[in-house]
Image (spheres, rainbow, N blue to C red):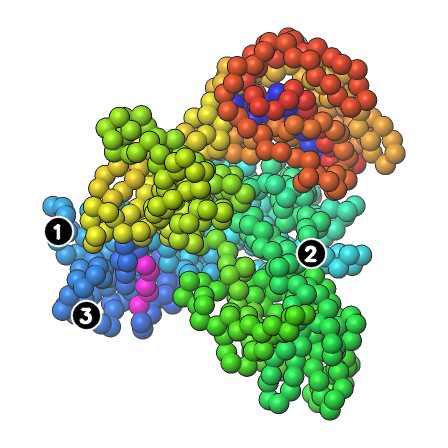
């Protein structure tokens, strides 16, 4: 159904004084395309030389593919070892006990900003008439991840393989002031540390709604790549899509800054540039960050232009400071919760000294009352840091606690006073380490005196007035695969030819999906009538009582008869391969290495989910469509994968229409307005906001389940009008707040909006708090918004004078 449905909340994010409107006429361009046998190239826009000789490795690069395939390759030279008995090999595939040459040399290619190596002279492919081929795409990444090579999914009979290698060598030069930045801000009133660095993992593209686009990165410069050839150091890049000169297509509208600032209770990034706007003025950009812990695929939106300042909103969980103690949100919007480790003091031995600490709680005896950690020396307790429950991230993405302001520490190399601290880094305990325990120096004692030696903490070092502890636990394990994929689009809506397919909104943390079964499979007795299929998206199944598939499985098949408890469970696979975009409106996800196949003891069960765009489907439901030997194929029609859609707007009636769905909505008759106007408050002053503006532009965002309204109107700005963004979000509650944080009980009240199709009565009588009963008729003539929500609207406003 249509995202804002019959029930909504409205987020009025900004007021911006509009002093000047600038019209830009742009023309499209085609950058140069070329190849070279050298290991360097000069890109055509800025004539910067990319030299990839540093990517040559004495040990070769290695990446793991499907079914245990191992790819080894080298760049700017051959591998040192042989492959299939042959020397002077550039790339090799190891499959089981066999090896296949993937190439003896390679070429370096440049195409519209994309750089890649193609390997030549591969061995003959046993499953086809062609030779093996390998392509290694070079991706810009200023912050290196632990795994730099990623293999794109492929079919079992594939002869061509694609690997992405992320490296700073594929980036334009990085400004010195952001080379080691943390992109954090510490709220001194609460001690909370905001960390926006996870947002630097990818570029964000947003339209200016006037025929051009912005490419944005946060904390780092825009990542150079296909149709993202932005100036070095630019954090906000304006792309003139119709420019005929490719050297005049990309403009720096905001130079990257190392850290955000805090203004009027909100995170802000102010980005200046040298690009001329008017006379002596230059363009700049401002990004305002807003908290919403429920947003799964956060991305910026262009609000409008204020003089020469481009203003953006960015709604993200990373802007929240009201998380529960001992929890944090990862860059993939997963919540890591260490609170179950609280109130369990540990005593560790190192060099005849006894160290005691606890997680997010007091260490207890023999430590002092407010100590999170202490050490016993000469029978005296020395504080190694005071308690706090703020879980944060380091540069590598590992969660940690930092207890500071312990006892004075005497350092011989400094004259300043330093104090002891304790850093507890939580390390993911994967399947290879679970159950093997930790080092023998661990003795943990809870209040009951019981001891455990499973996983747990270990002292790594005690130097420079800091105690470093590694705590091995499965609670620290984050996503193993990504639920986002880039798709190349010949004529994308924003004109950049590259869009992101994002299925993170379908990831479930509370319930598993139960798939439907195509009736033909039951008729043909391929599937029993009591067989059920449970799955999750990009993540393991949510643990449920009675569902006994192996831990970590993302798909499970079970028998559910007269007893509601599943029996005879079999894993259909684990989330080992990331999402693959087939095109902008279709993607595939594969789960591999499930239980042993009943019909072939030498094979393992596996499954694949094909996601297809269907704007009428809502979130949709997976359907088992076919079974081939040991492989199960599911289809999932959903609007989450659909690209955004610009709706039509009729000013005379204040009606917006989604032509894709064939539904309309009259804003004048909305329950949160009075004849198209609504009251907002700014610093104790009330203003009437007319949302029926002449040039309103409504944009449906299916992935976030909302409709954005962008318009200009008279507002509280001096000597000008206001740029406004209004977010209409499907909800079952109604209220209008001036700030998201005012809703302290938001998480307890909000319920998911279900878009399942249902017949809806034409007339509905609804009851709203402090309001008389009201009959809604014409406004819901074509009721298709959100059929399981009540006909209520939720409104909230955020603004800046």
The residue pinned by badge 1 equals: 126
What residue do we see at 40% from left, 49% from top?
549
Q: Position of residue 592 (x, y in %)?
A: 32, 50
Q: Of the residues tagged 2 and 1, which is closer to the observer?
A: 2
The residue pinned by badge 3 equals: 82
* SS state under label 3: loop
**Depicted 569 relative to depicted 759: above or below:** below
How far separated are the C-alphas under marks 3 and 2? 54 Å
Q: Position of residue 756 (x, y in %)?
A: 50, 24
| Residues at circles 3 and 1 in contact by the CB criterion of under 8 Å | no
Look at the image and give the residue range highlighted in magenta.
Answer: 60-64
**Depicted 458 relative to depicted 553: above or below:** below
* SS state under label 1: loop
Q: Of the residues tagged 3 and 2, which is closer to the observer?
A: 2
**Depicted 294 relative to depicted 475: above or below:** above
The residue pinned by badge 2 equals: 325
Q: Position of residue 105 (x, y in %)?
A: 22, 61
What residue do we see at 13% from left, 51% from top?
126
């Amino acid at each position: 159904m249509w995202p804002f449905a019959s029930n909504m909340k409205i987020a009025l994010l900004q007021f911006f004084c509009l002093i000047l409107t600038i019209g830009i006429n742009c023309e499209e361009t085609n950058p140069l395309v070329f190849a070279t046998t050298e290991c360097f190239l000069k890109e055509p826009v800025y004539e910067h030389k990319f030299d990839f000789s540093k990517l040559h490795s004495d040990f070769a690069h290695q990446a793991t593919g499907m079914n245990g395939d191992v790819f080894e390759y080298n760049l700017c030279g051959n591998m040192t070892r042989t492959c299939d008995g042959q020397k002077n090999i550039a790339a090799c595939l190891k499959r089981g006990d066999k090896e296949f040459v993937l190439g003896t040399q390679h070429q370096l290619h440049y195409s519209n900003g994309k750089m890649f190596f193609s390997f030549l002279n591969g061995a003959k492919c046993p499953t086809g008439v062609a030779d093996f081929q390998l392509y290694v795409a070079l991706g810009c990444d200023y912050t290196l991840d632990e795994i730099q090579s990623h293999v794109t999914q492929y079919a079992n009979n594939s002869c061509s393989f694609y690997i992405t290698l992320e490296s700073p060598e594929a980036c334009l030069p990085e400004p010195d002031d952001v080379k080691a930045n943390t992109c954090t801000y510490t709220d001194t009133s609460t001690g909370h540390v905001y960390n926006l660095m996870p947002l630097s993992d990818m570029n964000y593209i947003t339209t200016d709604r006037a025929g051009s686009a912005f490419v944005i990165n946060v904390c780092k410069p825009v990542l150079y790549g296909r149709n993202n050839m932005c100036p070095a150091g630019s954090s906000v890049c304006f792309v003139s899509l119709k420019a005929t000169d490719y050297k005049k297509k990309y403009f720096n509208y905001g130079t990257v800054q190392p850290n955000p600032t805090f203004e009027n209770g909100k995170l802000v990034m102010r980005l200046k540039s040298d690009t001329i706007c008017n006379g002596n003025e230059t363009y700049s950009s401002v990004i305002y960050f807003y908290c919403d812990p429920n947003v799964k695929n956060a991305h910026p939106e262009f609000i409008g232009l204020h003089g020469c300042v481009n203003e953006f909103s960015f709604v993200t969980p990373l802007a929240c400071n009201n998380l529960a103690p001992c929890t944090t949100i990862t860059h993939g919007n997963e919540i890591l919760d260490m609170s179950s480790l609280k109130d369990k003091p540990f005593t560790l031995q190192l060099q005849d000294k006894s160290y005691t600490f606890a997680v997010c709680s007091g260490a207890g005896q023999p430590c002092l009352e407010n100590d999170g950690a202490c050490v016993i020396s000469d029978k005296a307790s020395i504080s190694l840091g005071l308690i706090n429950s703020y879980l944060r991230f380091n540069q590598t993405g590992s969660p940690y606690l930092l207890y500071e302001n312990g006892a004075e520490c005497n350092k011989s190399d400094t004259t300043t006073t330093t104090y002891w601290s304790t850093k507890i880094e939580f390390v993911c305990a994967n399947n290879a380490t679970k159950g093997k325990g930790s080092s023998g120096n661990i003795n943990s004692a809870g209040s009951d005196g019981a001891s455990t030696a499973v996983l747990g903490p270990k002292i790594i070092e005690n130097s420079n007035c800091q105690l470093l502890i590694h705590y091995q636990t499965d609670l620290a394990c984050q996503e193993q695969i990504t639920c986002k994929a880039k798709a190349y689009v010949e004529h994308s809506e924003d004109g950049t030819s590259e869009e992101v397919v994002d299925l993170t909104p379908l990831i479930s943390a509370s319930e598993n999906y139960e798939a439907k079964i195509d009736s033909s499979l039951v008729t043909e007795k391929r599937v029993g009538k009591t067989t059920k299929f449970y799955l999750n998206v990009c993540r393991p199944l949510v643990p449920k009582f009675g569902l006994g598939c192996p831990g970590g499985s993302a798909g499970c098949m079970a028998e559910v008869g007269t007893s509601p408890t599943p029996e005879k469970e079999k894993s259909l696979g684990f989330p080992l391969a990331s999402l693959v975009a087939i095109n902008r409106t279709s993607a595939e996800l594969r789960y591999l290495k499930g239980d042993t196949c009943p019909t072939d003891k030498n094979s393992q069960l596996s499954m694949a989910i094909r996601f297809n765009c269907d704007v009428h489907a809502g979130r949709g439901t997976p359907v088992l469509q076919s079974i081939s030997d040991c492989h199960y194929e599911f289809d999932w029609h959903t609007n989450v994968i659909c690209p955004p859609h610009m709706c039509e707007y009729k000013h005379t009636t204040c009606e917006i229409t989604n032509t894709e769905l064939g539904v309309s909505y009259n804003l004048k008759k909305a329950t949160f307005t009075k004849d198209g106007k609504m009251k907002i408050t700014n610093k104790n002053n009330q203003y009437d906001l007319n949302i029926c503006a002449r040039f309103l532009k409504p944009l449906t965002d299916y992935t976030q389940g909302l409709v954005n309204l962008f318009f200009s109107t008279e507002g509280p700005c001096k000597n000008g009008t206001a740029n406004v963004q209004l977010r209409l979000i499907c909800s079952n509650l109604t209220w209008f707040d001036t700030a998201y944080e005012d809703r302290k009980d938001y998480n307890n009240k909000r319920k998911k909006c279900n878009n399942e199709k249902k017949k809806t009565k034409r007339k509905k009588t609804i009851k709203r708090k402090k309001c008389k009963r009201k009959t809604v008729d014409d406004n819901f003539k074509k009721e298709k918004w959100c059929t399981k929500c009540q006909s209520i609207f939720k409104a909230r406003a955020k603004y800046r004078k």
